[in-house]
Each structure stands twice: as structure tokens, then as C-alpha cells.
Amino acid sequence: MFKRTDTKVVKIGDLTLGGCNHVLIQSMCNIKTSKVSQVVRQINKCAALGADLMRVSVLDEKDAKSIKKIVENVSIPVIADIHYNYKLALLAIENGAKKIRLNPGNLRNIDEVKEVIKKAKKHNVAIRIGVNEGSITSKIKEENPNLSETDLIVKLALDYIKIFEENDFNNIVVSLKSSDVFKTIDAYKKFAEVSNYSLHIGLTESGFDEIGIIRSSATLGILLHEGLGNTIRVSLSSDPEKEVLTAKRLLHDLGLYENYPTLISCPTCGRTEVNNIKLLASKVLKYLEDNDINLKVAIMGCAINGIGEGKSADIGLAGGKDQYVLFKKGKATKNVTASDAYNELIKEINDLAKTKI
Ligand code: SF4
């Protein structure tokens, strides 16, 4: 199987994707692309949160032409999402999109695809061949009665890639998505057995809030842990900002995104003395994120077991109805009153962060 580090390298503007490069985070704007100022604001917000790339939908000429103004006002590459109309791909490239997403399920005319390839070559633009389960038409199924759905997804991608290779174009990224965890994992693994193109991994239509986050994490976590995936999108029925933060946290927890804080908090039990451990833990995490402090911090519900259970953390608090124990690397350092606990912890975190610079 071709792992992440074995994949071909792709240039997307100033970014390099694939090979030994870090896994890039991307999301997609959920505002009509022609609403330029709103789209710019959303892209810049996502970039500040950690997005490396942002995709926009191109439904018409106005959207395609809007890309020009958008790219002038953002610092990360913009990807144009194209369906059905190859002319919109040409226009998006002319207006500054650094990557185009084409769906082989709805852009099948070879002459039109060749036109897009010609234009992409001229402007040094990358192309994602984005297959998903919906790309498999009943005609394709009828023509290949012995192939499973995941085999068909992989076949569709490989057949489409041939058009690009025959036209001497290799600046390709591939995605093979489904809304089903098993099919998605299966499709990516099957593809990686036979091809070393860089992979954009994601689960499509994964749902909202915890449902989407858990389903995406189950899928992407397995793929990433097995060494697949050069760029990820966590698709949620939510704002792109949430997609970026979820992707960042997922990559960090898998050791693929450094320089990010880790917050651990205990599950609580009958020994818990802290009134609202979630409130305290989330306040501390927000402080760490807002101030770019990359420490591991523990918030634990009791001092009896919490100090030991949280010993992997650089620093932590163990509750404490009226009093908390502040500890470092599993060793109690001082007692603090409940009312002073947050401020005392933050002061110690700041001191510790200075020693780590
Ligand atoms: Fe329970 Fe204490 Fe462990 Fe939290 S740290 S789960 S309160 S024993």
C-alpha cells in the first residue's frame, strides 16, 4: 500500500501537498461565492484557526469571476468546486483558483476535461478528482455488475486519472468519499494499493455536531493512523470554522499536528468534588488556544486519584469543593482555594510556558 509519505507531491499555490509534507487542513465556505466580502471574512477566519486551504462552490459565472477579488484578500489558496460545467472551471482558473475539484460523475466529456487540463497546466493549477458514492450512476453499475460500490468508486477515479495522464498532467489529488464509514475506508485503502496519488480524505454528509464529529473521526482516524491522507476535510452540517477546529484536534490527537494544546479532564465519578468540571476545563482550554500555549493541562475531579491519573500532564488542578491541589507532572505543588483556582492555574501556566520557549 502506498502510504502518505510515498505519495506524489502536488503544488497548490505556495503550498506543497503530499509526500513527507504535513497533512493539510481544509474546509469549504457555506456562503454563496459571489458574496465576496462575507466569503473573504469566512476564509480569513478559518485561516486564522488553522485552515491551509479553503474551497468555494462555483455555480455560475458570477461565482467564478468573484474568485479574483477573493484571492486578492486572503492569504491561503482557494479551491473552486466545479460540477457539470467545464467552462466554469476555465473561468475559475483564469480568476485565480489554485486548485479545481472535478467530479468524474458529472463532468465526463473527454474534450471538455482536456480543455480544463490545458488551462490548469498553463496556470500551474492542481486538480482534485473528487469521486463520491453519488458519482456512481446506475449506468456505471449496470456496466460493471460484478464490482462492489467501493470497487466502482476506485474504478471511476482510476479511469478518470487515465485521461489526465494521457494528457501529461500529474498535479492530481484524489478523494473517494461516501457517507458510510466502512465504504469510505475500503475505497481509500483499495485505491492506495494501486496508486500513489496524494489523497484528500473525508467522509461526506457525515452529519451535525457529535454525530458528524464521531463518524468523521472514526473514519479519518483509522485512515490517518494507517498512514493514509495528505489533506483532510471534516465535513459537518455546521460552520467551516468548526470543521477546521475539529480537523486540527483530530490531527493533533493522532500526533500529526504539533504546537497545539492538550486538555485532559477526568470523566468524573462519585468522588468528584468540582461543581462544574466541564466549565472549568473549557475555560482553561480556551485560554490555552487563544494564547498559543502548547502545554498538556489536566482538570481532575478529586485530589485523591486525580493527581496520579493526570500525571502525564505538564500541570493540572485536582478538585476541591472548597480547595484544589495544583500539581505538576503528577506532583502536588500547592493548595489553592476554589475561588482562586483558575487564576492561580493560569499564572502557573504562563510561567511554565515561558520556560518552554
Ligand atoms: Fe473520579 Fe477522581 Fe478519577 Fe475524576 S479523578 S474520575 S473524580 S476518581
Image (spheres, rainbow, N blue to C red):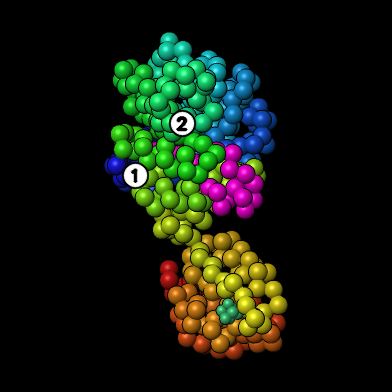
Q: Quadrant of the C terminus?
A: bottom left
Please identify the residue farthest to the top as the structure is shown.
111
- The image shows residue 120, relative to residue 3, as above or below, that is above
Residue under numbered circle 1 = 4
Q: Amino acid at mark 2?
A: Glu
Mark 2–mark 1 contact, CB under 8 Å? no
Residue 347 position within the rendered picture, expressed as x and y whole percent measured from the top left: 58, 77
Q: Quadrant of the N terminus?
A: top left
Q: Nearer the viewer, residue 186 or 207?
A: 186
- Judge left or right: residue 117 versus residue 304: left
- The image shows residue 280, relative to residue 146, as above or below, that is below
Residue under numbered circle 2 = 149
Residue 332 position within the rendered picture, expressed as x and y whole percent measured from the top left: 51, 87
Range of residues picked out in magenta: 199-216
Residue 338 position within the rendered picture, expressed as x and y whole percent measured from the top left: 68, 83
Question: Dot 2 surroundings within 10 Å: few (below 14), some, or many (20 or more)?
Answer: some
* Residue at x-position 36% and y-position 50%: 226
Q: Amino acid at mark 1?
A: Arg
* Residue at x-position 48% and y-position 82%: 308
